Amino acid sequence: MPAELEPHLADAAAYIRSQTPLQPEVAVILGSGLGVLADEIEDATHIPYADIPHFPVSTVAGHAGMLVLGRLGQRPIVAMQGRIHLYEGRTPQELAFPVRVMRALGATTLIVTNAAGGLNPAFPAGGFMLIRDHIFLPGMAGLNPLIGPNDERIGSRFPPLAGAYDPRLRALAKAVAERLHIPLHEGVYVMVTGPSFETGAELTMLRAWGADAVGMSTAPEVVVARHAGMQVLGISCITNAAIPGTEEQLSHKEVLETAAAALPNFLALMRGIIEALEV
């Protein structure tokens, strides 16, 4: 990150540093129903998003809106207990801000998690998908968080996104999952804006494009992290079957319930990955 931060970014980072001296190595974004991992953090400092200057605040059920800094095992981390979405009326640039703040605090690795619908019929609800690549539909339609003036001190004007999900980190995640006997599929995540769930025709189209899971987040955060030079790992909790004929049965309550049932394996997998990281 540049020595002289943009004023809003500098204000946010300075406030957080005034609350804790911890310098995180790893940043974690916890998706719908997955925020309980933050409760595992030791010697934790909890900072409501609303207290951090210029920080956008979560408004969705299942997203606590708390920044948590501490240690998981021996690893210093910062975790977003809940994220911000485009469908809340936020701009792509507002979605970028928390990632840049965590990078300014010192984090060089970002782990993004989400609750997603399984487009691939081989991926059962309650299981996990390691994100190999993504299709960022809102970004392709003009909602890319890097639109606007570029600060070359942070990243290049045209950052490459090939290999955005670090192959070395993916191999590490697979090894941890195998050791823990937790099934971990691998596939392509597609982001839509939401908040409405997809129609049957839309699900058919997304599957035909090669997507294995669909959700309403993650891709903007990954774009910003890669722009800032962070290495990225992504994991989806498959909370429902996103297959034509099932779309009318889905609710956000079901998503949260399935995520809750998957929490023991999620916590074990995430702790194993974070403790095994070399950063």
Image (cartoon, rainbow, N blue to C red):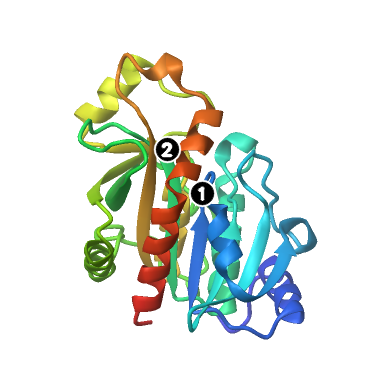
Q: Position of residue 241 (x, y in %)?
A: 33, 28
Q: Is residue 173 left or right of residue 99?
A: left
Q: Nearer the viewer, residue 16 or 100?
A: 16
Q: Position of residue 106 (x, y in %)?
A: 54, 80
Tell me if residue 185 comes above or below residue 207 in the rendering. below
Residue found at the very far right of the displayed protein: 51
Q: Residues within 10 Å of mark 2 (few under 14, many from 20)?
A: many
Q: Residues within 10 Å of mark 1 (few under 14, many from 20)?
A: many
* Quadrant (top left, top right, bottom left, bottom right) of the C terminus: bottom left
Tell me if residue 184 comes above or below residue 279 in the rendering. above
Q: Nearer the viewer, residue 134 or 65?
A: 65
Residue that label 2 marks: 215
Tell me if residue 31 comes above or below residue 138 in the rendering. below
Residue shown at 28%/55% (left/top)?
A: 182
Of discs 1 and 2, which sits in the foreground?
1
Residue shown at 22%/62% (left/top)?
A: 178
Alpha carbon of mark 1 to alpha carbon of mark 2: how far? 10 Å
Q: Identify residue type, mark 1.
A: Gly
Q: Is residue 245 visible?
A: yes
Residue shown at 23%/50% (left/top)?
A: 186
Residue that label 1 marks: 31
Q: How many marks?
A: 2
Q: Secondary structure at mark 2?
A: strand
Residue shown at 36%/18% (left/top)?
A: 246
Q: Secondary structure at mark 1?
A: loop
Point out which mark residue 65 bears. none
Whether label 1 touches label 2, CB < 8 Å = yes
